[in-house]
Image (cartoon, grey):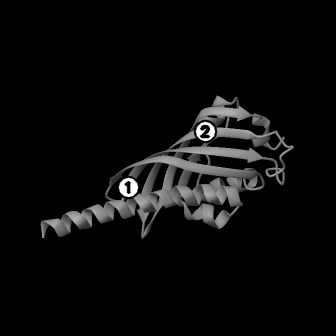
Amino acid sequence: MTDTITTSSILADLADRAAIADTLHRYTAGLDLGDAELLTSSLTEDAVVDLGPAMQRIGYEFPPLGPREVAVSTLIGAVGPLDSSHAISNIRAAVEGDTATVYAYAQAQHFKPGTGSDPKVTRHALMMNRYTASMVRDGEQWRIRHLEIANAWFDGDPLMLLGE
């Protein structure tokens, strides 16, 4: 019976970690696809998304976005139209019951709308960010309650991120 309990615990932990990774993927895919519904599915109603540390690093002040409705409308309005791609890696999660603290890297490439696949276009904004997220279990899936995004490095034109 001990093997069954251990196996069940291991499987539950792996399922949580897969669901946590899926939450990060829903968040970034929502941005890349301009899909408000998908982005909404990754956040709690009281969610706060804090891009301040990332934006300060490239010279801009940016207030935390919350609750979810404000975060989604702001992010979809700013990032949704861009040709962007976010790649999530190095996910580490400390799961305690129905809460988790999650760390990950997110490399994000941004081009003006409709220009991302044009090889002549060189104006871009490429960011390597560090995500620190507080997540909560919501039924079968996890959602982000608080996400802080800090920039590790940047290449390109930061004005692109402001729609200029």
Query: Which residue lies at the image location 45% right of the left edge and 58% below the top edge?
Result: 20
Q: The disc labelled 2 sits on which kind of residue?
A: Met
Residue at the spot 50% in from the left edge and 55% down from the top edge: 144
Q: Nearer the viewer, residue 65 or 159?
A: 159
Which residue was labeled with disc 1? 99
Residue drawn at 38 percent across, 64 percent down: 15
- Mark 2 and mark 1 in contact? Answer it, CB < 8 Å: no
- In x, y percent, where is residue 39? 61, 61
Q: Residue at x 49, y 54 (%)?
A: 145
Disc 1 marks a residue whose amino acid type is Thr
Residue 4 lies, in percent from the top left, at 19, 69
| Pointer 2 residue | 128
Picture mark count: 2
Q: Residues within 10 Å of mark 2 (few under 14, many from 20)?
A: many
Look at the picture and state if 57 lies above or below 48: above
Quadrant of residue 76 in the image?
A: bottom right
- Which callout, 2 or 1, points at the residue further toward the start of the chain? 1
Horizontal and vertical percent position of residue 111: 78, 46
How many angstroms separate mark 2 from mark 1 (CA)?
26 Å
Classify mark 2: helix, strand or loop: strand
**Residue with the most extreme right position:** 120
